[in-house]
Amino acid sequence: MCISAHSAFAQYNQTTRQRPLSTRDTVKPERKVSDDELLDSLRKKEENKRDSIVYNSKFIKVTNENLLNDSTQTFPIDTGIANFENYSPLLDPRNPRIHLGNTGLSQRSLLFEPVKTIGFDVGMHALDIYTLQPQDIKYYNARVPYTLLTLFNGFGSSAEQLFKVIHTQNIKPNWNVGFNLNFNGSKGFYSSSNVLGQNVSGLNAALFTWYESKSKRYNLLANATFNNLKAPETGSILNDSVFTSSPNTLIFKNSLPVRLPNSYENWNNKGIYIKQFYYIGHLDSLNKDKENSKILPTQRVAHTFNVQNGRYNYIQSDQDTYNVFPDYYFSDRRSRDSLVYTHIQNEFSYSFYLRSKSVKFVKNELKLDLGLVHDFWHYAQYVSDTTLNQYGAQFIHQAKVQNSTFQDITLKAKLSYRFSDRIGFEGDLRQIVQGRDFGNYFYDAKLILAGGGRVGKIILEAYSQNSSPPLIYTDWISNHYIFHNDFSNQKTTSLSFNYINNPLQLDIKAEYFLIANYLYFTAQPGGIDAHPAQLSNDINLLKISIGKNLKWRSLHFDNYVVYQKTDYQSTLRTPEVYAYSNLYFSRTLFNVLHSSFGINVRYNTEYVAPSYAVGIGQFYNGPNVTFSSYPVAAIYFKATLQRTNLFLMYDYANQGLSSKGYYTVNRYPQQDHLLKFGVSWTFYN
């Protein structure tokens, strides 16, 4: 641009451009331009339309609440295609799930995954992975408007349909706003083409903003979230031999009858989340004017305000002809069960940082966080009941069957000390000191030992947890299930060893769990009367996870294996071995198309499959049914071209070779083979 401008002005008459010459040299040495100044300059040039600018991902920085807890730091957005084919939360290679058949339906983890939360819990988590929570929101510093559109679908099928939108832009250099929109319109693989009530319908929406003062001392993170999820609960198809029928038997799976054609659960939640923090005292800067720059405070005060209002609904408009439910308490052909809750949380915290004068060298760095959390809860439960009016006529109304309001106060403390960049210690303490859940605690300690080069690092961790039983275990009233129990708190003690070596792409983790007063759902032998229970004996569980990625030239082989063993396998119904392997070949085609072609395989050993309780969203230990276990393979091609990522995948490609189909939950067949595609478009305007 400079050369072009110089050449253009060179055509003018020199006499028209003459200016008085200075009597002395006033030219200053050239100053290095920072990234922010460069972006501002490019923006001004674009707005004045003096020239066209090609933007790329380095102009968009991203962060989240966790990354802002210790310092102000941002990173360039990820535009790669790693794991792009694993688009669904059900397909996470390192967190496999069991579910009712397709994305959007009830699910839980295939392996044992401890929950490290304390305090009040409703106990409904079957649709959690499909929700958008305030802590999940990403915040951006986008000097140019940024939009990401993503679509996942099946060729010739509406079994899975997902669409996502992210848009964000800076309205000022230090103030960003944006929104998220996620849609799920999956119809599934069985008996869904003609009954609207059997289609998944999911919507997630969020508005978010991040403001940082010019002095870098004040930050505001705010978001408003909305979730509305509808998941059919059909009680499964009537044909329990769908994968074992004679080859000559023609089965149209999308028209198979189900036990409950018009039954579904509907969860909706809306909330406002505001977090403010202010840095006091001296501010240190690390890697100034670089992509990984950080603002390091010496003291910080913060306040978090979180309001959530939600409702869990179960709708049944069918007569239970096939005995899906164990009992009826209010109506034999209509259910309108709901639980409504309001949660208001205020958290105040103070952080103190003590570090050496030279922030480039991490040595003897101390950080102390102190916090006070106040939680206000109100919940009420309703059922559809029939009663008589003043004239003796029957009418249906929503009856309130329980109502409660309570508070909890939690003290929090976190201490971390780094002796050097290779040795560090972290301690985390959370204790409920007043309220309904008094006595709940979580104590955690970590020791981090890191070596240089290819040595890797070791993380030793130990924690102890004491948590109250969820509400659905102790007090629950609905049309088909009523529970009133007095259970003890569940206690978990854990020790773990984790070795991570990034240069070798190797990570090994060994975990030991001792669980006392374990809570779970079970039924009478061979029965369907799902109900909560508590194990009187302690459970010992050993879990070993190994991840290793291999590479030879353009050939990649990524592997992840988990082995877990418990002395109560009949209670903790999970497989002993789970394995995931991904073999793919990467190559740049036509000098512009960065692509990968490969096959991934998932496998787990046989285990006694859990059953599912319709109406309360709980997986329980029902009939002792063990399904044969086979690998599930997917062949895929994925590529990126400038601002577009795409993939084409033939999922469950080996169906009909080793097996006709498979189950992970009793009575609920999993997906058939399907050709899927996905595409994401990125726009920098």
Image (cartoon, rainbow, N blue to C red):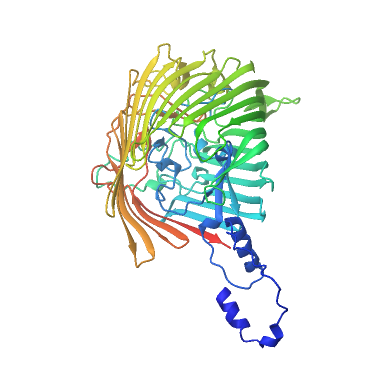
- Res 257 visible: no
601 versus 440 height, above or below: below
Q: Quadrant of residue 279?
A: top right
Q: Residue furthest right?
A: 390
Q: Quadrant of the C terminus?
A: bottom right
Question: How many numbered circles are shown?
Answer: 0
Q: Nearer the viewer, residue 408 or 325?
A: 408
- Residue 623 placement (x, y as % from top left): 36, 24
Q: Nearer the viewer, residue 169 or 269?
A: 169
- Residue 668 placement (x, y as % from top left): 39, 36
415 versus 140 height, above or below: above
Tell me the residue at 67%/46% (across/down).
Answer: 211
Left or right of residue 252, residue 144 in this image? right
Left or right of residue 27, residue 92 in this image? left
Left or right of residue 584, residue 282 in this image? right
Q: Quadrant of the N terminus?
A: bottom right
Q: Quadrant of residue 518?
A: top left
Left or right of residue 241, residue 98 in this image? right
- Res 208 visible: yes
Q: Nearer the viewer, residue 667 or 115?
A: 115
Tell me the residue at 49%/17% (across/down).
Answer: 490
27 versus 198 height, above or below: below
Tell me the residue at 52%/15% (across/down).
Answer: 489
- Residue 234 placement (x, y as % from top left): 46, 37
Q: Nearer the viewer, residue 223 or 170?
A: 170
